[in-house]
Amino acid sequence: IHVSTSNIKFILCNAYNIPNSNQTICELKSFMQMLDPDIPVLLLGDFNKHHALWAGPHVPERCVASDMEDFIQLLAETGLELSLPPGMPTFTSAAHKTTSTIDLVFA
C-alpha cells in the first residue's frame, strides 16, 4: 500500500509466510526489488520463522530457520531494520505454553 500525505510518503507492506515455507520470502524479494529505493518501506507481518536476529539468543537451535539467508540479505540490501526489541514475544502457543517472536516489523 502506498501511503501519501502532504508531507509523508511511504510503502506499507504486510506479509504472511506459510509455516515451513519460504514462498512468501521469495516473492517479497522480487517485490522489494521493484520499489523506488527513495520511498521508505514499513514491512510487517507473520513470517513464521525463528531466528536469533529477532528472537534473541534464547531461541532453541532446533527452532532456528535455516533458510533465512535470503531474507536476511534482503534486509541488508534494503536497509530495513527490526523495529521491535529482539526477543519480544509476538505469538503465544496455547498448545505448547510458549511464546515466540515470529510476527515482525521492519522499517
Image (cartoon, rainbow, N blue to C red):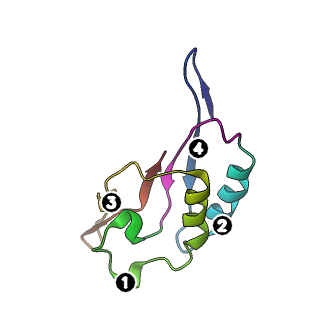
Q: Are marks 2 and 4 in contact (CB under 8 Å)?
A: no
Q: CA distance from mark 3 to mark 1?
A: 16 Å
Earlier-in-chain disc, 3 versus 1: 1
Q: Is residue 43 magenta?
A: yes
Q: Residue 85, which numbered label?
A: none
In the rendered structure, which amino acid carries the disc numbered 1? Glu
Which type of secondary structure does the marked residue at label 2 adopt? helix
* Residue at left offset 57%, top offset 52%: 15
Residue marked by disc 4: 13
Where residue 99 appears, x then y in whole percent? 28, 65
User: Residue 23: percent from the left, percent from the top?
Assistant: 66, 66
Q: Mark 2 and mark 3: span between their CA atoms? A: 24 Å
Give the residue pinned by disc 2.
Answer: 23
The residue that label 3 is drawn on is 86
Amino acid type of the residue that numbered disc 4 sits on in the rendered structure = Cys
Q: Which residues are magenta?
A: 36-48
Residue at 47% over, 68% down: 49
Which callout, 4 or 1, points at the residue further toward the start of the chain?
4
Query: Which residue matches tag 1?
Result: 61
Looking at this rendering, what residue extends furthest in the top direction?
Answer: 6
| Numbered disc 1: secondary structure | helix
- In percent of width and height, residue 76 lies at 56, 59
Q: Is residue 21 visible?
A: no
As measured in the structure, the alpha-carbon distance from the residue carrying label 4 to the one carrying label 1 is 29 Å
Q: CA distance from mark 2 to mark 4?
A: 16 Å
User: Of tags 2 and 3, which is closer to the observer?
Assistant: 3
